[in-house]
Amino acid sequence: AQSVTQLGSHVSVSEGALVLLRCNYSSSVPPYLFWYVQYPNQGLQLLLKYTSAATLVKGINDFEAEFKKSETSFHLTKPSAHMSDAAEYFCAVSVSNTGGFKTIFGAGTRLFVKA
Amino acid sequence: NAGVTQTPKFQVLKTGQSMTLQCAQDMNHEYMSWYRQDPGMGLRLIHYSVGAGITDQGEVPNGYNVSRSTTEDFPLRLLSAAPSQTSVYFCASSYRRTQNYGYTFGSGTRLTVV
């Protein structure tokens, strides 16, 4: 069965510093992997997704993630944090099944950005 | 293009009451689902639908019913509300049932059961 582990429920960085949010997954079949962002009192928005076309995936707002099969990881990075990046980030894994597909979300990592 | 619309945004129920959370999408998405979000637990799948007339259970289906009579609508019914159902509920949809394009989420319904 698939699962997602996000390391660190809270991450704090200074404005302009590197952002690194960690995600490890478990899946018995090749997965689709996603990062979503949730701003306060809003729904989740798709940030980027991995669907086996390329291991380095670029998303919105200069975020990117690298799929590493050997490490079963899909960490999210951004070279320079901005105050507006403060939000909660969710990693998700999805696999096809007979009924369509099933998506499992991680517990989330809240990103704080200090001025 | 409204995307995924959820109503109401906020609701307070008394224990034992029933209610329906509404979800509608105008993107002709085949796949629709309901999640609940609780602190420290991420999102947990309640029910999902791969098309009109087809529904199935997710991780935490107890106490909830769904139906999908049209492609656009996917209401979630709480049969007899309990305090454990206090949560934020999100409806999400996706383009195709057989490939995962990622979800479009509604803005959520914050439910409190007292």
Image (cartoon, grey):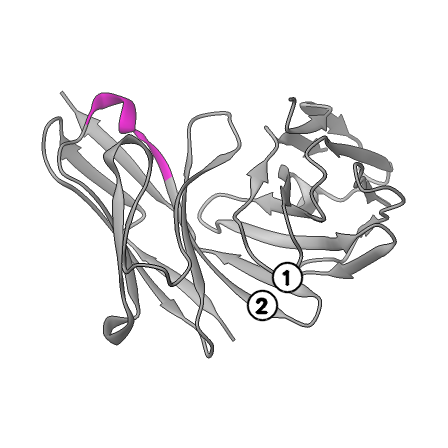
Tell me which amino acid carries mark 1: Thr
Residue, x 55% and y 55% (percent of image)?
B100
The x, y position of residue A67, in whole percent, is 28, 62
- Around disc 1, counting alpha carbons within 10 Å, would you say few (fewer than 14), some (14 to 19), or many (20 or more)? some
The x, y position of residue A32, in whole percent, is 45, 61
Q: Magenta residues, as a range?
A: A82-88
How many numbered discs sit on the rendered protein? 2
Q: Which circle, 1 or 2, is nearer the viewer?
A: 1
- Quadrant in the picture for the N terminus of chain B: top right
Residue, x 61% and y 32% (percent of image)?
B106
Residue, x 59% and y 62% (percent of image)?
A102
- Around disc 2, counting alpha carbons within 10 Å, would you say few (fewer than 14), some (14 to 19), or many (20 or more)? some
- Looking at the image, which is closer to me, B63 or A79? A79
The x, y position of residue A31, in whole percent, is 45, 67
Taking the image as shown, residue B53 lies to the left or right of residue B45, namely right
For residue B21, above or below residue B100: above
Circles 1 and 2, Cβ within 8 Å, touching? The answer is yes
The x, y position of residue B69, in whole percent, is 90, 45
Taking the image as shown, residue A6 lies to the left or right of residue A43, namely left
Magenta stretch contains residue B24? no
- Quadrant in the picture for the C terminus of chain B: top right
Q: Quadrant of residue A26?
A: bottom left
For residue A102, above or below residue A16: below
Q: Chain of mark 1?
A: B
Residue, x 15% and y 35% (percent of image)?
A13
Which residue carries the number 1 mark? Answer: B98
Marks 1 and 2, how far apart at CA = 7 Å
Magenta stretch contains residue A83? yes
Taking the image as shown, residue B26 lies to the left or right of residue A58, namely right
Which residue carries the number 2 mark? Answer: A96
Tell me which amino acid carries mark 2: Ser
Q: At numbered mark 2, what does the secondary structure look like: helix, strand or loop?
A: strand
